[in-house]
Image: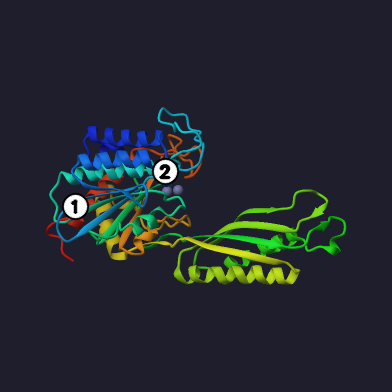
C-alpha cells in the first residue's frame, strides 16, 4: 500500500504529514527537552481549535476538544535518542549526537494530522490528544499522569501507535492482551577481596564470582519460567579489574529483565536475588543489588482491541492485520493502559526494496513514510467510531 492509496487524505494533507515528520526529524530533542517539538505541537492544536495545556509532565502537551460524556485519548510520544545519525538524507538530524531513531517523529506527525481532521468534524464525545515526552526510559508517561493527564476529562479509552520496522509497510499489529514486555533494570555490585594475581589464596576474586552469577542467572529463564511464557534476563555491562596481574576486588554488572505476565514480573526480583546471594555466599563475597522497575508490560484491552481491529481491517484489509506479533521491547504506554482500557498498535514501516530495514535505535534507522497516512487514518477512524453519537456500550 502506498501513501496515495489511502482513502482519507488529500495530496496536500499527505505532503503536510511528511513535512511535519521531516521537520521533527531534523530537530530531534531528548526526553524532557522537547521544547521546540512541543511548541510546534501546541501551535497546530491551537490553530485547529483545541484547548491546549502545556507543560504537562514537564514538556508534554495536551489538547482537548468536543463535549459529551465519552472521551478518547490519543497518545503520541515525542522524544529522540542519544544516537549520532548515519543516514544521508536531506532531512537528517541537524543536532549532533541526537536522533529520532525510534520513529517518534512519525508518531507526532500522524497524531497531528488526525487531530486536525477530527477538529473539523462534529462528534458525540471528547477527544484528548496527548503528546508525551520522554518515553525512552525516562518516565514521561508517569510524569504526565502525576500532572493529571488522566483527569478532567478522564478518558474512557486510550490508543497509541508505534511504527514497527520489523514489519512491511501496510501491515498492522492489533493484539489482545500483552503486546510488549515489562522493563526492569538491575545493578549488582559484587565485593570480593583484591590481591596479587599470582597469590589467589589470599583473595576473593570478584571476576570469578561475577562470571558465576552471569551463568547461574541464565537458569531463571531456562528453569524457573514456564517454557510457554516468554522472559529475558540480559546482562548489558560487566566491569571489573584493570590490570593483568591483580585480582579484582569489585565487579559491577548491569542488566535488564523482561516479562509478559504478572506472575513472572512479580517473581523476578526475588529469583535474581536468590542467585546473587547464593553465589556470593558460596564464594565468600558480598553484594549489593539494586532492582528497579521501569515499566509494566503493555497490555491491550481485549474488547477495545476488537473494536480497533475492525477499524484497522477496514483501512488495510484483513490480510494485513496481524495478531501474532509480540515483542520483548517495552513501552511506557503501559502506564496509561494500566489505568485506562486501550490498545497500542504496531504499524509496519519497513521497505525492503528501498533498503529501509534498519532496526529501531540504530544509527541508520529510517522508515517508509507511506506508513504515516495509514496510521493517521487509523487514529482518525477509531476516534470517529468511538465518539460517534450513535455509539453505545
Ligand atoms: Zn525506542
Ligand atoms: Zn519508541
Marks 2 and 1, Cα distance to the nearest angstrom?
33 Å
Q: Is residue 311 left or right of residue 211?
A: left
Q: In this view, does 201 lie to the left or right of 37?
A: right
Q: In this view, does 166 lie to the left or right of 221?
A: left
Q: Which residue lies furthest to the right in this view?
A: 198
Q: Is residue 8 above or below residue 190?
A: above
Q: Is residue 190 left or right of residue 82?
A: right
Q: Nearer the viewer, residue 290 or 14?
A: 290
Q: In this view, does 17 lie above or below 136?
A: above
Which residue does the numbered mark 2 point to in the structure image?
33
Q: Disc 2 or 1, which lies upstream in sequence?
A: 2
Q: Which quadrant of the figure has residue 174?
A: bottom left
Count the marks: how many? 2
Q: Looking at the picture, how far across and down is residue 48, in whole percent? A: 19, 41
Q: Which quadrant of the figure has residue 209?
A: bottom right
Q: Can residue 1 be seen in this view?
A: no
Q: Can residue 279 be seen in this view?
A: yes
Q: Nearer the viewer, residue 297 or 251?
A: 251
Q: Nearer the viewer, residue 54 or 319?
A: 54
Identify the residue at image location x=51%, y=33%.
86
Which residue does the numbered mark 1 point to in the structure image?
384
* Mark 2 neighbour class, 10 Å CA radius: few under 14, some 14 to 19, many 20 or more: some
Identify the residue at image location x=42%, y=51%.
135
Amino acid at each position: 500500500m502506498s501513501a496515495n492509496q489511502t482513502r482519507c487524505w488529500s495530496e496536500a494533507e499527505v505532503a503536510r504529514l511528511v513535512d511535519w515528520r521531516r521537520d521533527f526529524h531534523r530537530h530531534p530533542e531528548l526526553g524532557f527537552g522537547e521544547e521546540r517539538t512541543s511548541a510546534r505541537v501546541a501551535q497546530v492544536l491551537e490553530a485547529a481549535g483545541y484547548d491546549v495545556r502545556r507543560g504537562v509532565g514537564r514538556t508534554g502537551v495536551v489538547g482537548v476538544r468536543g463535549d459529551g460524556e465519552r472521551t478518547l485519548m490519543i497518545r503520541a510520544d515525542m522524544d529522540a535518542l542519544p544516537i549520532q545519525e548515519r543516514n544521508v538524507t536531506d532531512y537528517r538530524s541537524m543536532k549532533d549526537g541526537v536522533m529520532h531513531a525510534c520513529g517518534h517523529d512519525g508518531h507526532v506527525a500522524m497524531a497531528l494530522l488526525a487531530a486536525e481532521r477530527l477538529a473539523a468534524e462534529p462528534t458525540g464525545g471528547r477527544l484528548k490528544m496527548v503528546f508525551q515526552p520522554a518515553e525512552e526510559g525516562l518516565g514521561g508517561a508517569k510524569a504526565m499522569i502525576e500532572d493529571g493527564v488522566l483527569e478532567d476529562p478522564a478518558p474512557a479509552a486510550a490508543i497509541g501507535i508505534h511504527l514497527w520496522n520489523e514489519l512491511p509497510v501496510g501491515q498492522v499489529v492489533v493484539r489482545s492482551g500483552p503486546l510488549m514486555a515489562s522493563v526492569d533494570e538491575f545493578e549488582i555490585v559484587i565485593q570480593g577481596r583484591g590481591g596479587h594475581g599470582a597469590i589467589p589464596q589470599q583473595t576473593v576474586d570478584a571476576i570469578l564470582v561475577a562470571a558465576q552469577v552471569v551463568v547461574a542467572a541464565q537458569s531463571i529463564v531456562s528453569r524457573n519460567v514456564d517454557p510457554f511464557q516468554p522472559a529475558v534476563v540480559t546482562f548489558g555491562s560487566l566491569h571489573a579489574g584493570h590490570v593483568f596481574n591483580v585480582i579484582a576486588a569489585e565487579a559491577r554488572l548491569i542488566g535488564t529483565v523482561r516479562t509478559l505476565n504478572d506472575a513472572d514480573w512479580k517473581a523476578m526480583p526475588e529469583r535474581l536475588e536468590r542467585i546473587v546471594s547464593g553465589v556470593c555466599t558460596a564464594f565468600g563475597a558480598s553484594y549489593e543489588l539494586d532492582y528497579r522497575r521501569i515499566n509494566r508490560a503493555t497490555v491491550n484491552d481485549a474488547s477495545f482491541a476488537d473494536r480497533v481491529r475492525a477499524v484497522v481491517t477496514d483501512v488495510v484489509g484483513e490480510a494485513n492485520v496481524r495478531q501474532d506479533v509480540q515483542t520483548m521491547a517495552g513501552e511506557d504506554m503501559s502506564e496509561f493502559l494500566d489505568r485506562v482500557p486501550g490498545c497500542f498498535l504496531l504499524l509496519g514501516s519497513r521497505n525492503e526494496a528501498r533498503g529501509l530495514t534498519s532496526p529501531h535505535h540504530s544509527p541508520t534507522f529510517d522508515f517508509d513514510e507511506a506508513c504515516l497516512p495509514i496510521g493517521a487514518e487509523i487514529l482518525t477512524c477509531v476516534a470517529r467510531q468511538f465518539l460517534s453519537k450513535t455509539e453505545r456500550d
